[in-house]
Image (spheres, rainbow, N blue to C red):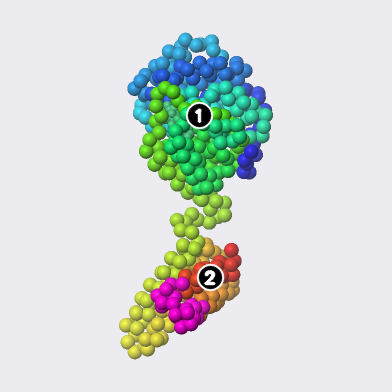
Amino acid sequence: MTENNLSSIPNEMLTRTRSLSIVIPTYNESKNIVKILDSLRAALTREMNAEIIVVDDNSPDGTSQTVEEYAKSSTNSGYSIQIIRRENKRGLSSAIVTGIERAKGDAVVVMDSDMSHPPQTIPQMVEELQSSDCDIVVASRYVKGGGVSGWPFKRKLISKGATKIAQHGLGIKIKDPMSGFFAFKRQIVNNIKFDAIGYKILLEILVKAKGAKVKEIPYTFINRTAGSSKLDLSVGVGYLQSIWKLYRYGKSVQASERRTSVHFLSKAGRFYTVGASGLLVNYFVSFLFGAVLSNLWYIYATMIGIVFSMSSNFILNKIWTFEDRKFDPRRTLMQYGLFLGFSGIGAVFQLLMVYGLVELRHVNYSIALFLAVAIASVGNFLLNKKWTFQE
Ligand code: GDD
């Protein structure tokens, strides 16, 4: 089980009402929908007190009419069937969110309509929500006992690749974050503001339902035999877009927890950007003093330029790179001293290294300079990070 820090929702609630909502998004699934509704009828017990919510995006093949007729003819089936018909095709994740918003059950199951997600797994998913200390149960293809049947090699590869991107990019620990078959306690999504981009709404729930405890149970995904997958290039693009948005979301949560800001650049990136800005400051200030005060010796003008650029570098690094916004005069003065000291050490190191490489090792000057600048600036960053700004 994977968990963060939020306490789990009390299980008594689920046991008390035993109500369950099953959200099924559909687009052109008239060849599958009756089969899945029949299988659900066989898999669900009356005690589950289930409602089925089909969210159809005005399928041209008449899926929603088929569902309506089915619902009329199965009034005494022990579960209710609702159909939400949306005007346009607005995507899988957004259809699921629409279904979740309508759901009344304490537990919600999300599944496809094409029989690739076996309804027989639902009782075990609900059982896990009730009996174990978890908030989300993911039916997983990639835990022991799970699998995929009928996918070509290319689709398996894409799925594995996308899974790795989600795991590494978003720090998600479960084995199958791309699963479209999952159950959760409805309460955990109450405060989530969904973006609902693309296909992967589970990812959004995993990232945004902070602290929710997750359990994976195995199942075998069976590739559809009727109708066709709606997965296309735009779904792939939507996937990357949603990963990026969720990544940014994670960063902004971390930043607000640490009371820092979200940055496009890493700390090292900001440090080197400041370094580059220092070169400009140095040039313009030296030039200005040299040109305006015509009787000032150019060496003095250059020295003034150096002092200005070091100072501007220090200020920017303090408030932007390391976000140290405390202004205690003594501490700031000490930091300034350390900053100048490390810059001085860096400059001396750079000189010695260039000299050593060119004179003693006969290395080409431009290569020697590049190596020396690179090492000196990395060293400078690390020293200032550890000592000046004490991170
Ligand atoms: N309402 C609505 N609107 N439903 C949609 C839309 C849409 O724009 N696009 C797809 N669906 C429905 C389909 O009718 C089907 O019931 C379900 O969403 C899944 O769509 P498929 O196009 O069949 O998905 P897939 O089989 O290729 O992808 C599956 O694999 C993923 C894991 O790799 C799905 O199971 C995903 O849920 C799963 O995440």
- Residue 305: x %, y % from top left: 41, 79
Q: Residue at x 60, y 17 (%)?
A: 45
Q: Can I make out residue 205 in this image?
A: no
The three-letter amino acid code for the residue at tag 1 is Ser
Q: Residue at x 58, y 28 (%)?
A: 107
> Mark 1 — residue?
149
Mark with earlier residue (2, 1): 1
Q: CA distance from mark 2 to mark 1?
A: 53 Å
Q: Quadrant of the N terminus?
A: top right
Q: Is residue 367 magenta?
A: yes
Q: Are there few (<14), some (14-19), or many (20+) residues within 10 Å of tag 2?
A: some
Q: Residue at x 57, y 22 (%)?
A: 120
The span shown in magenta is: 349-371
> Mark 2 — residue?
379
> Is ligand 1 within 8 Å of the beta carbon of the residue shown at mark 1?
no
Magenta span main SS = helix
Q: Vertical placement of 121 versus 216: above or below?
A: above
- Residue 359: x %, y % from top left: 46, 83
**In which image quadrant can residue 217 be found?**
top right
Q: Nearer the viewer, residue 171 or 336?
A: 171
Q: Secondary structure at mark 2?
A: helix
Q: Is residue 1 magenta?
A: no
> Is ligand 1 within 8 Å of the beta carbon of the residue shown at mark 2?
no
Q: Quadrant of the C terminus?
A: bottom right
Q: Vertical placement of 74 versus 14: above or below?
A: above
- Residue 159: x %, y % from top left: 47, 38
Q: Secondary structure at mark 1?
A: strand
The three-letter amino acid code for the residue at tag 2 is Gly
Q: Residue at x 54, y 75 (%)?
A: 342
- Residue 66: x %, y % from top left: 41, 16
Q: Indicate left or right for 181 with 61 as reference.
A: right
